[in-house]
Each structure stands twice: as C-alpha cells, then as structure tokens.
Amino acid sequence: VHSLLPFILLGIGVDDAFVIVNAFNRERKVARSAESNADLTNRSMRAMSRAGASITVTSLTDLVAFGISASSSLPALASFCAYASIGIVFLWVFASTFFGATLVLDERRQRDNRRECLCCLTRKNAIKEDEDEAHKEDAVSLYFRNYHAPAILSKVGKIVILGIFSGLLGFGIWGALNLSVEDTQRSFIPSDSYLTNFINAADKYNSESGIDVFFVFEGSSDIYDKRQKLAGLDDELTGLSSKAPYIAEPTSESTYRNVMTGLYTYLEANTAAAIGGATLGDDSWPTSEADLVSTLKAYASVTGPGNMYSRDISYSDDGTKIDAFRVKSAYITLTKEKSNGDIIDDAEKQIKAMDATREMITGWGNSVPTVFLYSEKFISVEGFKIIRRELFVNVGLALAAVAVIVFFTVASPVTSLLITFNVAACIIEILGFMYAIGIAIDSVSVINIVLAVGLSIDYSAHVGHCFMLKGGKNKDRRALEALADIGAAVLSGATSTFLAVVVLLFSKSYVFATLSKQFALTVGLGITHGLILLPVLLSLFGPKAFSSAEMPAGLSKVDKDSNSHDLELEEDV
C-alpha cells in the first residue's frame, strides 16, 4: 500500500503550488517589464503572506490527521500514515521555500524575455505588453465571478444547493451505516487470472472444508492422564458445520487429523509390538507416561505407521516428555456471493467461527489439557474484528484534530466550524458512495478514507480562509470574491490530483483500482463541497472579515444596488 504515497503527495503538493502561483500572480499590479528584482521580491513576500497562511492551514491539518492515524491498531494504516506525515512536512518546507524562490526566478525569466527551456537564450521579438498591464483574471476566475457564484448565491440557488446536499448527506449516512467488513483477499488476484476460476471451482465442489484450524494441547502429564478424552475429540467436533463455529465434520484426514485418535486405533488393532513393544493396559493404552512417549515416537516417526502425524508433536529437549501436540481440523468454506455474482470470503462468518471456537474450547474446561487455537487466517480475522471500529475512530479523531487546527489557524470559530462540518459531510458521503459502488471496509479502503480527510480539507480550508480576507458586510459579495480569487487554484489542484491517479482507473490491481475510485469520490465530493456548499454556508452564517481584509472594488452580480454597496464600503473603511 505504501506504493500509493507518491500519488498522494503529488496531488497535495501540486495543490499548494497552484495556491502560491495564484497569489503571486494576483499581487502583480504593473506590467512585468516595469518590475525590478526588488519589486519581484516584494511581490513574492506579499504573495507568501497570503498563500503561506493558507497552505500552512491545510498542511498542518493533513499532518495532524495522518499523525493521529499513525497510532492506529492496524499496522498497515499506522505505517502508511507515519510515512505520509513525514511527506507532508517536506512538501510544506519545499513549497514555502524552494518553490517560492524558483517562482521568482521564472518571473525574472519572463520579464527579461528569455525562453522557457533554454533560459540563457533571449527571444528576438519581445512579448507585447501594455505598460500599465496588471494581473487580469483568467477564464476560470471569470467563470466563478460571473456565472458560478451568482448562480449558487441567489435565493433560489441557495435553496436548491442546501436541498441537494441535505439529500447527499442523508444518503451518505444510510450508506455508511450499511458498510460491511469483507475479506477482500481474493480481490488481490487479477480478475483474468486462472486462479480465480480454480478457487471458485474449489468452493463449489469442495465446500465441506476450508480454513485449517489447529487445537494445540500442552502438558505431558495432562496429555497422558486425559489421553482417552483426547482420542475421542472427534465427538466434540461433530455436528458443528451448520452453525457457528462452522467446523467441518471430522470424517476425513483433510478435516480431522489427531495423532491420539490414530495411535489408539492402531494399538487396538495391532498392539504395540511393532512400535516399541510397550505394555498396554486394559484400556489399550501404554501403562505409563514414559511408555506413551516412547510409543508415540515410534508410531509418529517418519518411518512409522503414523508418519502423517510426525509434524504434529513437539517433545522436550531430552525427549522424555511431550511438550505439546496439535489436532488439525478445518472450517467449512465460509464464503458468500455478492450482488454482482462474485464469490468472496465471508468476513462476518469468519469472525463468528473464530469467536465460537474459542468459546467452545473454554467450555471444555478441565476435561482436556491446556489448549489454545491457532490458524494462519486468524491474523486477518483479528483485523476484521477491529477494522470497522478503527475506521470510525480514526476518521473521528482526524476530524476532531482538523477542527482544532482550523480553529487556531483560521482564527474564526464560525468559519472553522463550517469548514469542519463541510469536511465531515464530505467524508460521510464518500462512505455512502463506497457502499453504493461495492467498496467494502478493508485495509485498503480504510487507508484511503483517512487520506480523504486530508485531501478534502484542502478544498474547503482555502475557500474559508480566503473568505475571511475579503472585506465588506455583504456576505454574498465576500463569498463571490473568495471564489473568484481562490476558486481557480482550488479547481486546478483538484484536477491535478485526479489526473495523478486517473490512469489507475484502468489498473487490474485491486489496490490501485480501489484507490482511484475513492480518489475520484474524494476529489469530486471535496471540490463540490468546497466550491459549492461552503460558499453558500459562508454567505448565510459567515462571520465578519478580518480587520486587515481587502475591500472589493466595483459592483458584482450579487450586489442588490449600487447605493447600498457603496454605503457598506464606506462604513467598513
């Protein structure tokens, strides 16, 4: 999963770069040719004072969100988030130092009419530029100013937007509550692999046995004293296949292998003459613990009649006692069929099987020696038990951390609350759409959801922070100016993030395919919340601007009339 990090960091880093470039361009008040090196330095300083605060807010929230999840009980999630946190720190350092410096050098290149790739060469014909040409808004910024913002900030627009997003939030809550934990191990096999058909055929024609499970008994003296109970252990495992613990019927070597059962059957039929000649009692067992150990050694040796049990017994260092032996059993095939016809392992049944088996051996009490369970699959099943809780706990903690960081960095309780609500709604809706498109809770999707917290905060925090920098009492106008200012940069960052992973949509790898789908959801929902819902919320509930906020110039399509607008500007001045 760590191979996803370059794509994540690329998306976050480019987003910061767009914000810095946007602020740097907007600070240009004269033609490039009229700027000296000192002027460029001052422009860079003003730009970083605007953009630096914004990217610091998003970088700090990303860092804390990933840092908290680095303490998760899931090793894969903890390790991934730890490395992601380190990457976020370096992104911020390079964006705020190296990238700003190279931006100034590139601006000097443009001023001096030098070429892009071979900057040592000068163009023959200078680029035509008006002497008083300051920065002009590009087509995307004009779209936000003239079409997007007026549409969503009108009375009808606000009602429609709030209605649509309320429906999305309700859908997200429903989907999040219905998300299930699934064993997606089979999904890691490419869909066109022959293994898929083989495994499906094995499930169909050999469903009576599945995951191996071992009952490990310890204590040489206890094993000898309770030898008869251990030999008849198959009685305890019969009739458990149709309900939890879903243990397969002990009718063959593939579903039940017990050296004590094998030895007892052999001794009853053949005595011990061929395997050490130990004296047998009336119960057909060796009469002492030492004789049982020596008989087992001969019976279960690689050349003995019970050689299939040779790996099931562990002896003491001196070979005089039995440290432990294991009884092999198996669960039935615990699978289910998804709505699309795919057969997957049923994580819920696996959890019930593991827990019920543990309860069963606890119920045996003192009738058997000390016993514990072991299965290679239990490593995954233990993860299934906690992964749902880990998902909601880590997302909840990340959102709480985001709320605290935004509160102190944006310096506005109301704006920070609106940003946090916006991000929380976005995450809930991502969970809802995950349910709709068939993405289950597993180690891959959990990591991507935590990433979604870090990515979606970027789209909202930039807009919220920019709103606080726009002066005036008309909140609709402030929201419009914020969108016209930062909207293009946020949209460009979101587009670049999506383009960084769009090629993965066609991957046959389960990890990359799941990542790309969740990234598409994160970018799509994150950008709509940041550029549509949040401006509407800010226009309705947004606080007063910072005292250092800049006043908007002229009139816009959201101003009711020129007189009221002019009065507001005069009062604020």
Image (cartoon, helix red, strand yellow):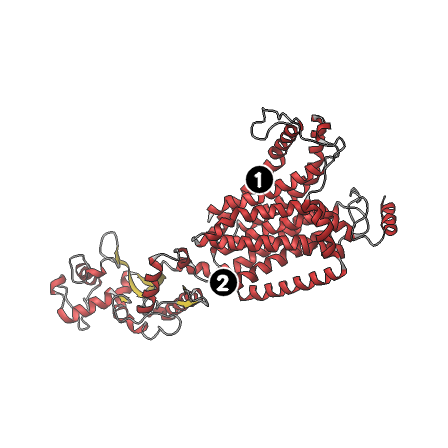
Q: Nearer the viewer, residue 311 or 38?
A: 38
> Which amino acid type is marked by label 1?
Leu
Residue at 25 percent across and 69 percent down: it is 252
362 left or right, relative to 205: right
- Residue 223 position by quadrant: bottom left
Q: Position of residue 545 (x, y in %)?
A: 78, 47
The answer to whether residue 179 of the structure is visible from this angle is yes
State the residue lying farthest toward the left. 273
Identity of the residue furthest to the front in this view: 125
**How dense is the environment of label 2, judged by Cα within 10 Å: few (below 14), some, or many (20 and up)?**
few
Q: Nearer the viewer, mark 1 or mark 2?
A: 2
Q: Nearer the viewer, residue 453 or 554?
A: 554
Which kind of residue does numbered mark 2 sit on? Gly
Percent across and percent down for residue 9 are 54, 44
Q: Residue at x 75, y 45 (%)?
A: 469
In the picture, measured across the screen, residue 262 lies left or right of residue 50, that is left
Indicate the quadrant containing the C terminus: top left, top right, bottom left or bottom right. top right
State the residue position of label 2: 438
Residue at 56%, 59% (x, y): give it.
392
Q: CA distance from mark 1 to mark 2?
A: 33 Å
The relative height of residue 100 versus residue 507 in the rendered view (above or below) is above
Q: Which mark is residue 91?
A: 1
Q: Is residue 464 visible?
A: no
